Structures are given as structure tokens and as C-alpha cells.
Image (cartoon, rainbow, N blue to C red):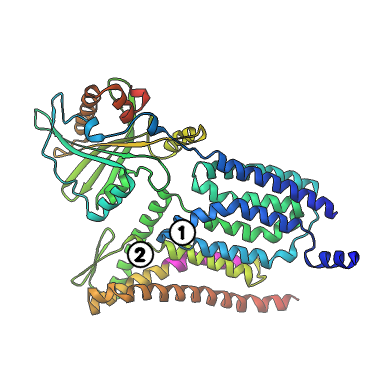
Amino acid sequence: MTTGAIFRSALVCLCLAAAGTLGVVLKPAHLLDRQSGEVDLQQMIPATFGAWKTEDSRSSGFRPDVQAEIDKIYAQVLDRTYVDTDGQHIMLSIAYGRDQENGSQLHRPEFCYEAQGFRVGDAFDGKVQTGFGEVPVRRMTATQGQRIETVTYWITVGHKATLPGIGRKLVQLSYGLSGEIPDGVLVRISSIDTGNDAQAAYALQQRFVHDLMHAVGGSVRVRLAGEAAA
Amino acid sequence: MTVAVRAWFKNTVHSPAWPLLSLFIAGVYAPTYVALGRTVWQTEDGSYGSLILLATLFVIWQARHRLSLVTSVSACLVGFALLALGLLCYVVGRSQSIVQLDAGSPIPVIAASVLILGGWKSLRAMLFPILFLMFCIPLPGVWLVALTESLKVLASVAAEHSLWWMGYPVARTGVMLQIGSYQLLVADACSGLHSLISLAALGLLYLNIAGKRAWFHVLVLVASLIPIALAANVVRIDVLALITYYFGDAAGQGFLHETAGLVVFAVALGLFLALDWLLSRLLRPRKEASV
């Protein structure tokens, strides 16, 4: 009886030891970022392209504690306002994270807006045509008093564009299990919706993405919108 | 001599099977809990985690006499299947930093080990502490935000109504309460999520330690945990609003802020224990009559 128990115990311990070892060995150690060169958002994204040109950079307008949080999470953040020849404004925000571990994972803009006191609503998922391929995007409206901001965003993990949630987790997992640590880019395009016409705002944002993708090179395109848009 | 040693061994340690298993489980899960201790348990949202783990170890230790080394074929079959599933979760969760899988895996892994070694009876003895480890799984960020947000709104609405009912000049926009000339923001920390989880854990632990009770009794007590915790949080917000109303902003945000939280949590726990006592009194005479 006792020898049987010891045998069973040893068998379970063997399984435990094997799992413990696998848990360490299978940890991805390879930064995907390193293979594809350093990232400099300021340089990667042109200040003028097509009908668009950068307006004098204003402060991001984040509350100091939110700004501190942003600086902690992301390796680089680019915040620019573009204006086209018709005087239409687009705010572009790109956040770059070196890895996607729990501490430095790209945050959902929903939470970011809510932390700023916006009410976020009318969220739905759609697609944006880059002219090179489709990118899955989430769209939403953030409201604070009189200010209505229409937002389009997506996340690119490694070389694949996705959205927060299960999709992102699966992309991350497929990289991780092949031993690679993917970097992450969050691209957010928003505009102040003065006419209270979300469809027009989304069309404007679509045009902006299209123009931006045509203005940058192939490798930057992969960084921003993944291989599907290359 | 050898006989004496053998007898001593048999009577004290019983068999090295359980200690050996405990050692390996501890070795496999030490990195998991150390990582949690360095990250999630340091934050306000997960600070109760280490206490849950200690309580679990204590309950397991208390129940160790009920373990046996007699198993059955069915227990072994189910046990190994469960072990494979649990360890798969562990390996993926640990290596890919999916904290919920990592911290959730000890539940199937320990349950399976107990099943293989000591059969269904041993698992029954250990079921509570094993399931109690659920409190050690950090809530996913999305759930945490959604729960905090809805609890905040619920608490604000309830506080507004209760203060209004007591005759105070109160108004509310979203999670912002206006009382007299003061404005109070029901912040994330005021959602009551922490006290809700802590009270639920403490209540269940108490029910496990306090001994046998009728199923109806247990059901009522478990069901009462959530309303008690929610009500206690509303009382806390009311009290802080009234302190601000009578003594000003500084008083409401000062040390009373923390103290009020502790006092109200103690009252909630007291309420739970009082309900337990009341149920014991109500249910006992009927039992005696039936004997």
C-alpha cells in the first residue's frame, strides 16, 4: 500500500517537475524588435504628406498623472495634429511598446479616454482600407461636455494588425510559443466632430490612413499596420 | 531498533508520499506566487492576494489529518486527466505570462494530485482550500474596469437616494455627488470592490472553519455576503459625505477617510456574524423538536 502511494507520488512529482521545466524553457527570449531595427516614430512618420501637414504641435492635453502613466508604459509616443488643404484636422497618436508583457501592454484607448473624464460610447468594429490591404479597427465616440471626439484605432502586435481582446492574445500567444517577444504599436486617429456626423468623420479618417500609408515605406507600413497591409 | 524507527515513521510522518508531493507543488508554484507578490499583490486592486494564500495554506494544514493514501482506479484516471489539463495551463500561462492561466492552474493541479494520491475522500477534505485559491487569480483588467465602473455607479446612486431620503441637499451627475456646497467624486477606490472581495473571502473562510451548519443556513449566509458588502460601502460613502458636509473637505479627505473604511468593514463583518448567530438560534429549536 505505502509503496504504491510513494510510486504514485513520485509519478505526479515527475509530471510537476517536467511542467516546471517547460514553463521556464518555453519562455520567449527573442525580441522581435531587435531583428527589424530600431524604431524612431518622429522620423518614421512624415510631417507633411499628400494634402496633410503638421500643425504646430500642441501639448497632448493629458492630465499629469495620466501622462506619467503613459511615459511609464510606452517606449515612445508620437502625438501630432495634421491639417489638410481644406482646413480639416486629424489628431494622430502612435504609441510604441517594446514588449507586450503585462506591465507594458498597450492600453485600450477606451480606458484612456475614460480616465480623462470622457464618456465613451457607440463603439463598433470595422475595417479601414489602407490601399495595400485591410486593417481591422475599432471605432467609438468620446464625449466630454460639448466636445465630441470620433476615434478610430487599431493595434499591431509584431507584424500583425489586431484589436484588444482575444484577437490580440492569440497573436501574442502565437509569437510567444515560437519563442519571440513581439513589440506593439497602437495607432489612434481622431477628429473633433463639429457637425455631429460620425460617418463623415470616419470617412475623413479613412482618407487620412490611406494617404499616410501611401506616404511611408514598406517597412514602416508593416510596423504600423502589419503584414496584411504591406 | 528498525522496528521502532519504522513505527515512529509510520505514526508521525505516515508516509513520505504527501511531504514529497507538497515539496514539488511548492517548488513548481513558488515562481508563480513570487511573481504575483511582486506585481499584482503590490497594487491596491490585488493587495488581498497574499492573505488568501496564507489562509489557504492554513486550512490545508488543518485538514491534513483527513488525508488518506487509499485511492481508486476512477480517481486515478480522472486525476491524471485533470493533471494533464492543469499542467498545460501552467506551462502556457507561466511561459507566456498569461497571469490568469498561471494563477488558476494550481486549482486543477492540486486537486488532481490529491485525487491520484488519496482518492475521492481526500479530495473532499481538501476541496474548500483548493477552490479558495480562486481568490488568488487576479481579475482580468477588462473585468476589473467593468466591475469597478458599474459598482461605482451603483454606489453613487444608492448614496444619493439614501442621503436624499435623510433630508440632505444632495444631487448627482454620474459618479459626482454634490452635497451642500461640496463636491465628492466617487473614485475607483470607493467602488467597494475590494471590500466586496475581502468580505466574500473572509465569510467563506469563517463558514469553513466554524464547523457544520445546515445547508439552508449556509445558503442564506453566502447569499447575504454581497448585499452586506454593497450596503456597507454605501454607508461608508454616506458617512464621508456627511463628514464633509458638517466639517468641510479637509475632514472628509483626512485620516477619517481611511478610518471610516475600516470601521464600516468591521461593521459589515459584524453584521455577517450576527446573521450567522440569528440563523443558529432560529434553526436550532426546530432541530431539537424533530429529534
Residue extending farthest to the front is: B1
- Up the image or down, A26 lies above or below B284; here it is above
Quadrant of res B194? bottom left
Three-letter residue code for mark 1: Trp
Quadrant of res B219? bottom right
- Indicate whether residue A160 is drawn in magenta: no
Q: Is residue A1 left or right of residue B288?
A: right
Q: Main secondary structure of the magenta part?
A: helix
Position of residue B33 measured from the top left corner of the image (x, y, whole percent): 54, 55
- Up the image or down, B25 lies above or below A222; here it is below
Q: Residue at x 58, y 45 (%)?
A: B90
Q: Residue at x 38, y 52 (%)?
A: B145
Position of residue B242 measured from the top left corner of the image (x, y, whole percent): 28, 76
Residue that numbered label 1 is attached to: B41
Neighbours of disc 1 within 10 Å: few (<14), some (14-19), many (20+): many
Name the foreground residue: B214 vs A93: A93
Q: Is residue A129 left or right of residue B196?
A: left
How many numbered marks appear? 2
Residue that numbered label 2 is attached to: B190
- Up the image or down, B93 lies above or below B178; here it is above
Element under disc 2: helix
Subunit ID for the residue under disc 2: B
Q: Is residue B216 visible?
A: no
Three-letter residue code for mark 2: Cys
